[in-house]
Image (tube, rainbow, N blue to C red):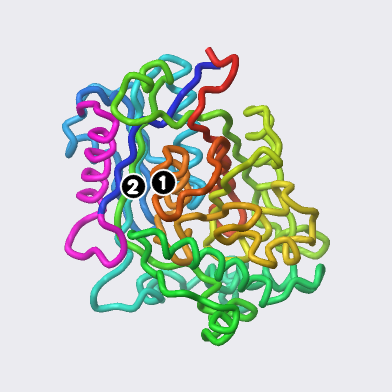
C-alpha cells in the first residue's frame, strides 16, 4: 500500500466568526493548508469538501479556488465521521494514481449574531411537520441530537452504573488541556462540581456534557509520503484508516447506545496500522458529548465494555494522566469543527507543535470521528514516522 501523509494544515479563525460564508471560509482554509505544505494551488489535483448540516458549499469551491484540472472532486457527508472518511478517500486516490495532492476541507457557519447557539441548530417548525411513522420522534419527544444522545447515555448508565460525575471527569480533563490551547473557546478551569452545577440540557446530560457551536473552516492536504518528505512541514503519516456505518436501531434487544460502529472502525484501522491500543500515545476522540468519548474508549478497547466510567476517573485523561486525550480541549472546550477538530489537533500533536499542551509522547496518534446518532464512525492512525515496509 502506498504510504500517504498529511502535508498541510489550514485553520481559519474559529468560534464567533460572522459576516463570512462557508465557501469563503473553506477557500481560506484550503489556501492556508496548501501554503503550510509549501505547495501552490496549482499543485492540488483532488478536492474533497464537507460542510455543516445546514450548509451547501458544494463543488463550486473548486471554481472559487481556480482549480480546473482535478482528478477527484466530491462533496462528502458522513457527519462527524466525514474528516476521517475524506482522508481515507484521499489516501486511496493517491494509491490508485487518481490524484497526487488532495485537499480535504470542512466549513460551517451555524452561529448567527442575533441568535443563541441552540437556536442556530433548531430546524424551522415547517420542516419538521412529519406525519405517520416518520413523526414518531417528535411525538415521543426525541426531537434533536441532545435528547437522542441523552437516551444513549442513560442506557449506558442503567446497564453499567455509569454516573454523571464520571462523565464530568471527561469534561474536566479536556478543559485542563484547553488551558494550553490559544484557539480554545473555553479555557477557564473546570471542576466536577462546576460541571454538576451547569444546567440540564437533556437528562442525564448537563450543559458541560455538550459540545460547543463554532463557525470556521479547517483543511488538510494529503499527498504521497515521498513527496511530503521534501515539503515545508514535517509529514504526518497515515498508518491506518477504518470506517463503519450502521442504521439507528432503537428497538428492544438492540445494543444501540451501548456498542457503536467504533467497535468495528477502530480495530480495522489499528489492524491496518499494525498496532494495538497499548501503543497509542495520544487519542483525539470525537466528543460531541462526554458520553461519546466514554463509549469510544470502550469500543476501541482501552477498557472493557461498561468499564468506561471507572477508566476515565482519577485524571487519567488529563494532562499528566495515563492517556493524553483530546489535548486541545476537543469540541467540549476547544472548538466544534466536526471531525476536523480531533484531526487538526492530532496533526498538531504529531508535528510536536502543541506548545504548552504538547503530549510527552507522540509516536502513535489515534483519531476518531462519530456521525449522526452513532450511525457513522471513522478512525485514523497517524504518526510522525514512516511506517516500516510502506511502499
Q: Quadrant of the N terminus?
A: top right
Instruction: Return the x and y of residue 290 as percentages of the image width and height.
Output: 59, 66
Instruction: Return the x and y of residue 257 as percentages of the image width and height.
Output: 70, 62
Above or below 2: residue 175: below
Residue that label 2 marks: 218
Please rate how many residues cluster around mark 2, counting C-alpha atoms within 10 Å: few if below 14, some from 14 to 19, many from 20.
many
Which residue is pictured at 38% across the width and 45% down the height? 50
* Residue span colored magenta: 13-40
Q: Earlier in the sequence, mark 1 or mark 2?
A: 2
Instruction: Return the x and y of residue 252 as percentages of the image width and height.
Output: 80, 65
Q: Nearer the viewer, residue 53 or 193?
A: 193
Quadrant of residue 172 within the rendered picture: bottom right
Residue that label 1 marks: 344
Q: Nearer the viewer, residue 140 or 165?
A: 165
Q: SS of the residue at dot 2?
A: strand
Above or below 291: residue 259: above
Instruction: Return the x and y of residue 275 as percentages of the image width and height.
Output: 68, 32
Which mark identifies residue 58? none
Does the residue at mark 1 contact the one at mark 2 (Cβ under 8 Å)?
yes
Quick check: 174 left or right of 70?
right
Which residue is pictured at 60% across the width and 36% down the height? 242
Does 264 lie within the magenta span? no
Quick check: 300 left or right of 354?
right
Please rate how many residues cluster around mark 1, counting C-alpha atoms within 10 Å: few if below 14, some from 14 to 19, many from 20.
many
Which residue is pictured at 27% across the width and 67% down the height? 16
Which residue is pictured at 77% across the width and 58% down the height? 255
Distance of mark 1 from mark 2, alpha carbons?
8 Å
How many numbered callouts?
A: 2
Does 17 lie within the magenta span? yes
Q: SS of the residue at dot 1?
A: helix
Amino acid at each position: 500500500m502506498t504510504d500517504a501523509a498529511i502535508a498541510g494544515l489550514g485553520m481559519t479563525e474559529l468560534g464567533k466568526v460572522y459576516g463570512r460564508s462557508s465557501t469563503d471560509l473553506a477557500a481560506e482554509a484550503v489556501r492556508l493548508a496548501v501554503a503550510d505544505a509549501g505547495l501552490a494551488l496549482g499543485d492540488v489535483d483532488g478536492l474533497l469538501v464537507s460542510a455543516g448540516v445546514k450548509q451547501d458549499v458544494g463543488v463550486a469551491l473548486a471554481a472559487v479556488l481556480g482549480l480546473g484540472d482535478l482528478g477527484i472532486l466530491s462533496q462528502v457527508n458522513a457527519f462527524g465521521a466525514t474528516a476521517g472518511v475524506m482522508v481515507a478517500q484521499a489516501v486511496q486516490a493517491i494509491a490508485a494514481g487518481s490524484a497526487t495532492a488532495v485537499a480535504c476541507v470542512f466549513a460551517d457557519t451555524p452561529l448567527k449574531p442575533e441568535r443563541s447557539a441552540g437556536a442556530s441548530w433548531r430546524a424551522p417548525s415547517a420542516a419538521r411537520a412529519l406525519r405517520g411513522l416518520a413523526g414518531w420522534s417528535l411525538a415521543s419527544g426525541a426531537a434533536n441530537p441532545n435528547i437522542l444522545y441523552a437516551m444513549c447515555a442513560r442506557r449506558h448508565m442503567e446497564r453499567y452504573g455509569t454516573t454523571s460525575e464520571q462523565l464530568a471527569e471527561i469534561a474536566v480533563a479536556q478543559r485542563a488541556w484547553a488551558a494550553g490551547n490559544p484557539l480554545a473557546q473555553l479555557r477557564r478551569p473546570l471542576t466536577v462540581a462546576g460541571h454538576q452545577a451547569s444546567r440540564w440540557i437533556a437528562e442525564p446530560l448537563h450543559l458541560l456534557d455538550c459540545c460547543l457551536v463554532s463557525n470556521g473552516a479547517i483543511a488538510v492536504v494529503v499527498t504521497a509520503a515521498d513527496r511530503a518528505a521534501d515539503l515545508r512541514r514535517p509529514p504526518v503519516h497515515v498508518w491506518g484508516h477504518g470506517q463503519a456505518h450502521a442504521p439507528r436501531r432503537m428497538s428492544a434487544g438492540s445494543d444501540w447506545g451501548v456498542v457503536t460502529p467504533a467497535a468495528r472502525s477502530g480495530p480495522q484501522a489499528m489492524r491496518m496500522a499494525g498496532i494495538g491500543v497499548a501503543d497509542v500515545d495520544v487519542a483525539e476522540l470525537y466528543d460531541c458529548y462526554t458520553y461519546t468519548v466514554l463509549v469510544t474508549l470502550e469500543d476501541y478497547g482501552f477498557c472493557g465494555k461498561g468499564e468506561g466510567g471507572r477508566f476515565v476517573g482519577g485524571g487519567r485523561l488529563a494532562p499528566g494522566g495515563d492517556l493524553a486525550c483530546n489535548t486541545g480541549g476537543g469540541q467540549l472546550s476547544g472548538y466544534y469543527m466536526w471531525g476536523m477538530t480531533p484531526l487538526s489537533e492530532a496533526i498538531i500533536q504529531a508535528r510536536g507543535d502543541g506548545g504548552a499542551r504538547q503530549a510527552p509522547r507522540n509516536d502513535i496518534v489515534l483519531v476518531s470521528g462519530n456521525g449522526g446518532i452513532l450511525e457513522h464512525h471513522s478512525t485514523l492512525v497517524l504518526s510522525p514516522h514512516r511506517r516500516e515496509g510502506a511502499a
